Image: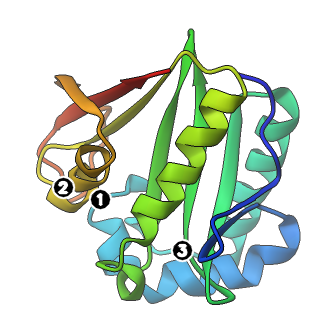
Protein backbone atom coordinates (compact mmCIF):
# COMPACT_ATOMS: atom_id res chain seq x y z
CA UNK A 1 0.00 0.00 0.00
CA UNK A 2 1.22 3.48 -0.82
CA UNK A 3 1.41 6.21 1.82
CA UNK A 4 -2.07 7.48 2.74
CA UNK A 5 -3.24 11.07 3.02
CA UNK A 6 -2.34 12.64 6.38
CA UNK A 7 -5.94 13.77 7.00
CA UNK A 8 -9.14 11.88 6.23
CA UNK A 9 -12.67 13.03 7.02
CA UNK A 10 -16.28 12.22 6.33
CA UNK A 11 -17.47 15.58 7.66
CA UNK A 12 -18.23 14.16 11.12
CA UNK A 13 -15.11 12.20 12.05
CA UNK A 14 -11.63 13.39 11.14
CA UNK A 15 -8.49 11.29 11.16
CA UNK A 16 -5.23 13.21 11.46
CA UNK A 17 -1.74 11.85 11.33
CA UNK A 18 -0.28 11.91 14.85
CA UNK A 19 2.17 14.74 15.57
CA UNK A 20 4.48 15.24 18.52
CA UNK A 21 2.54 18.39 19.45
CA UNK A 22 -0.40 16.14 20.45
CA UNK A 23 1.50 14.58 23.36
CA UNK A 24 -0.41 16.27 26.17
CA UNK A 25 -3.78 15.80 24.49
CA UNK A 26 -3.07 12.09 23.90
CA UNK A 27 -1.89 11.60 27.48
CA UNK A 28 -5.02 13.24 28.86
CA UNK A 29 -7.44 11.21 26.72
CA UNK A 30 -5.80 7.84 27.40
CA UNK A 31 -5.28 8.54 31.12
CA UNK A 32 -8.92 9.63 31.39
CA UNK A 33 -10.11 6.25 30.05
CA UNK A 34 -7.28 4.07 31.34
CA UNK A 35 -9.47 1.35 32.85
CA UNK A 36 -11.59 1.10 29.70
CA UNK A 37 -8.64 1.11 27.26
CA UNK A 38 -6.31 -0.90 29.50
CA UNK A 39 -8.83 -3.73 29.72
CA UNK A 40 -8.15 -4.51 26.04
CA UNK A 41 -4.85 -2.83 25.14
CA UNK A 42 -1.69 -4.09 26.83
CA UNK A 43 0.08 -0.76 26.24
CA UNK A 44 -2.40 0.91 28.62
CA UNK A 45 -2.37 -1.59 31.48
CA UNK A 46 0.24 0.11 33.68
CA UNK A 47 -0.99 3.68 33.41
CA UNK A 48 -0.20 6.19 30.70
CA UNK A 49 2.13 9.13 31.07
CA UNK A 50 3.46 12.01 28.98
CA UNK A 51 6.62 9.94 28.54
CA UNK A 52 4.59 7.02 27.18
CA UNK A 53 2.87 9.39 24.74
CA UNK A 54 6.19 10.87 23.64
CA UNK A 55 7.61 7.38 22.99
CA UNK A 56 4.53 6.40 20.95
CA UNK A 57 4.61 9.63 18.92
CA UNK A 58 8.33 9.25 18.15
CA UNK A 59 7.80 5.61 17.13
CA UNK A 60 4.78 6.35 14.93
CA UNK A 61 6.62 9.23 13.22
CA UNK A 62 9.47 6.84 12.32
CA UNK A 63 7.11 4.05 11.22
CA UNK A 64 5.18 6.46 8.98
CA UNK A 65 8.43 7.61 7.35
CA UNK A 66 9.49 3.96 6.88
CA UNK A 67 6.09 3.03 5.38
CA UNK A 68 5.43 0.38 8.06
CA UNK A 69 2.46 1.79 9.94
CA UNK A 70 0.22 4.80 9.42
CA UNK A 71 -1.34 5.92 12.72
CA UNK A 72 -4.07 8.53 13.08
CA UNK A 73 -5.73 10.48 15.88
CA UNK A 74 -9.53 10.35 15.72
CA UNK A 75 -11.33 13.67 16.23
CA UNK A 76 -15.04 14.28 16.73
CA UNK A 77 -16.43 17.79 17.23
CA UNK A 78 -12.87 19.07 17.47
CA UNK A 79 -11.93 16.75 20.34
CA UNK A 80 -9.51 13.83 20.35
CA UNK A 81 -11.54 10.69 21.06
CA UNK A 82 -9.29 7.81 20.00
CA UNK A 83 -6.69 6.41 17.68
CA UNK A 84 -6.49 4.04 14.74
CA UNK A 85 -3.88 2.80 12.34
CA UNK A 86 -3.05 0.91 9.19
CA UNK A 87 -0.25 -1.66 9.48
CA UNK A 88 1.42 -3.03 6.36
CA UNK A 89 1.09 -6.79 5.81
CA UNK A 90 2.13 -8.96 2.87
CA UNK A 91 -0.32 -8.03 0.08
CA UNK A 92 -2.61 -6.03 2.32
CA UNK A 93 -3.02 -4.24 5.62
CA UNK A 94 -4.32 -4.70 9.15
CA UNK A 95 -6.32 -2.01 10.94
CA UNK A 96 -6.26 -1.47 14.68
CA UNK A 97 -8.22 0.99 16.83
CA UNK A 98 -9.24 2.26 20.26
CA UNK A 99 -11.72 4.82 21.62
CA UNK A 100 -11.97 6.74 24.87
CA UNK A 101 -14.84 5.53 27.03
CA UNK A 102 -16.98 8.65 26.52
CA UNK A 103 -16.82 8.24 22.72
CA UNK A 104 -18.13 4.68 22.51
CA UNK A 105 -21.57 3.71 21.27
CA UNK A 106 -21.95 6.56 18.77
CA UNK A 107 -20.72 4.88 15.58
CA UNK A 108 -17.51 6.93 15.55
CA UNK A 109 -15.23 3.93 15.13
CA UNK A 110 -17.36 2.57 12.31
CA UNK A 111 -16.91 5.92 10.54
CA UNK A 112 -13.16 5.98 11.22
CA UNK A 113 -12.66 2.43 9.96
CA UNK A 114 -14.75 3.19 6.86
CA UNK A 115 -12.32 6.02 6.08
CA UNK A 116 -9.28 3.78 6.64
CA UNK A 117 -10.65 0.95 4.49
CA UNK A 118 -11.44 3.29 1.59
CA UNK A 119 -7.99 4.88 1.83
CA UNK A 120 -6.23 1.50 2.03
CA UNK A 121 -7.98 0.23 -1.10
CA UNK A 122 -7.44 3.53 -2.94
CA UNK A 123 -3.70 3.25 -2.13
CA UNK A 124 -3.34 -0.31 -3.43
CA UNK A 125 -3.99 -2.67 -0.52
CA UNK A 126 -5.21 -6.06 -1.73
CA UNK A 127 -7.11 -6.75 1.48
CA UNK A 128 -7.86 -5.29 4.89
CA UNK A 129 -7.88 -7.37 8.06
CA UNK A 130 -9.15 -6.53 11.52
CA UNK A 131 -8.28 -8.66 14.54
CA UNK A 132 -9.86 -8.41 17.97
CA UNK A 133 -10.00 -10.46 21.13
CA UNK A 134 -12.82 -12.97 21.21
CA UNK A 135 -14.27 -11.32 24.33
CA UNK A 136 -14.23 -7.79 22.89
CA UNK A 137 -17.68 -7.92 21.33
CA UNK A 138 -17.86 -4.15 20.69
CA UNK A 139 -14.64 -4.23 18.69
CA UNK A 140 -15.96 -7.14 16.64
CA UNK A 141 -19.15 -5.27 15.80
CA UNK A 142 -17.18 -2.82 13.63
CA UNK A 143 -16.00 -5.26 10.92
CA UNK A 144 -19.34 -7.09 11.05
CA UNK A 145 -21.17 -3.79 10.40
CA UNK A 146 -18.83 -2.97 7.51
CA UNK A 147 -19.31 -6.21 5.59
CA UNK A 148 -16.07 -7.94 6.55
CA UNK A 149 -16.06 -11.75 6.62
CA UNK A 150 -14.88 -13.60 9.70
CA UNK A 151 -12.16 -15.85 8.26
CA UNK A 152 -10.76 -17.49 11.36
CA UNK A 153 -9.17 -17.18 14.73
CA UNK A 154 -5.64 -17.28 16.08
CA UNK A 155 -3.84 -17.15 19.40
CA UNK A 156 -3.31 -13.57 20.61
CA UNK A 157 0.20 -12.30 21.16
CA UNK A 158 1.27 -12.32 24.79
CA UNK A 159 1.26 -10.64 27.20
CA UNK A 160 -2.50 -10.16 27.23
CA UNK A 161 -4.46 -7.21 28.59
CA UNK A 162 -6.65 -8.13 31.61
CA UNK A 163 -10.02 -8.57 29.85
CA UNK A 164 -8.63 -10.60 26.94
CA UNK A 165 -9.42 -14.27 26.48
CA UNK A 166 -6.34 -15.10 24.41
CA UNK A 167 -7.89 -15.83 21.03
CA UNK A 168 -8.26 -13.24 18.27
CA UNK A 169 -11.06 -13.32 15.73
CA UNK A 170 -9.81 -12.42 12.26
CA UNK A 171 -12.01 -10.48 9.83
CA UNK A 172 -11.14 -9.74 6.21
CA UNK A 173 -12.35 -7.67 3.29
CA UNK A 174 -10.78 -8.00 -0.15
CA UNK A 175 -10.42 -5.12 -2.60
Picture quarter with the N terminus:
top right
Q: Is residue 82 above or below residue 93?
A: below
Q: Are marks 3 and 2 in contact (CB under 8 Å)?
A: no
Q: Which residue is mark 1?
A: 40
Q: Which residue is mark 2?
A: 136
> As drawn, is 72 to the left or to the right of 157?
right
Residue 139 placement (x, y as % from top left): 27, 55
Q: Which residue is mark 3?
A: 48
Asked where in the image residue 28 lies, by quadrant, the reply is bottom right
Q: CA distance from mark 3 to mark 1?
A: 14 Å
Q: Secondary structure at mark 3?
A: loop
Q: CA distance from mark 3 to mark 2?
A: 21 Å
For marks 3 and 2, the one nearer the N-term is: 3
How many neighbours does mark 1 have within 10 angstroms: few (below 14), some (14-19), or many (20 or more)? Answer: many
Q: Is residue 85 above or below residue 75?
A: above
Q: Are marks 2 and 1 in contact (CB under 8 Å)?
A: yes
Amino acid sequence: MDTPAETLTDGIVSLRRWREAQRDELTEVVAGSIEHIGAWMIWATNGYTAETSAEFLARTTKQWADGETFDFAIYFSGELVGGCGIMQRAGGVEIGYWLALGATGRGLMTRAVTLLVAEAFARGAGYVEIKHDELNVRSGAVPARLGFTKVGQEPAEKPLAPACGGTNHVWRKDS
